[in-house]
Image (cartoon, helix red, strand yellow):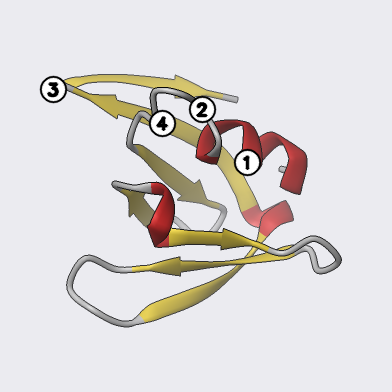
Amino acid sequence: MTAAEIRQFVDASPFVAFRLHLADGRKLDVPHPDFIHVFKTDPRAIVESERGGWQFVNLPLILTIELVNHGKRRARR
């Protein structure tokens, strides 16, 4: 995915929590826009965990984004 595609989810109003599905099988939750930073000139993002810590994520390795809202889930490709 591109930075612009991910920013659409981060900047959505109202914000809806989402889950990143990565090529290696990992899933990373983004419960609030403060939990992710998408760089302007780098094809990576920093995703913070609710339990503490953070991870660099290469944007091209994000396969899908799943919206998580009130128990309903919807995947977007």
Q: Is residue 34 above or below residue 51?
A: above
Label 2 vs 4, first from the N-terminus: 2
Amino acid under disc 4: Glu
Inter-mark Cα distance, 1 to 3: 22 Å
Residue 33 vs residue 1, the one in the foreground:
33
In the figure, 43 relative to 75: above or below? below
Q: Which residue is mark 2?
A: 12
Does residue 14 appear left or right of residue 69 in this picture? right
Q: Nearer the viewer, mark 4 or mark 1?
A: 1
Kindly indicate the quadrant of the structure image that contains residue 42: bottom right
> Distance from label 2 to label 1 (Cα)?
10 Å
Element under disc 1: helix
The residue that disc 4 covers is 66
Which is more foreground, mark 2 or mark 1?
2
Label 4's element?
strand
Query: Identity of the amino acid at label 2?
Result: Ala
SS at badge 2: loop
Outermost residue toward the left in this view: 71
How many numbered discs sit on the rendered protein? 4
- Residue drawn at 62 percent across, 31 percent down: 8
Task: State which mark lies toward you, 2 or 4.
Answer: 2
Gap in Å between the C-alphas at discs 3 and 4?
12 Å
Q: The C terminus is located in which quarter? A: top right
| Local crowd size for mark 4, using a 10 Å CA cut-off: few (<14), some (14–19), many (≥20) | some
Q: Identify the mark nearer the N-term, 3 or 2.
A: 2
Residue position marked by numbered label 3 in the rendering: 71
Three-letter amino acid code at disc 1? Ile
> Which residue is disc 1 drawn over?
6
Tell which circle, 2 or 1, labels the residue nearer the N-terminal end: 1
**Residue 43: image location, x then y, percent:** 78, 63
Determine whether 76 is above or below 22 in the image: above
- Which of disc 1 and disc 4 is earlier in sequence? 1
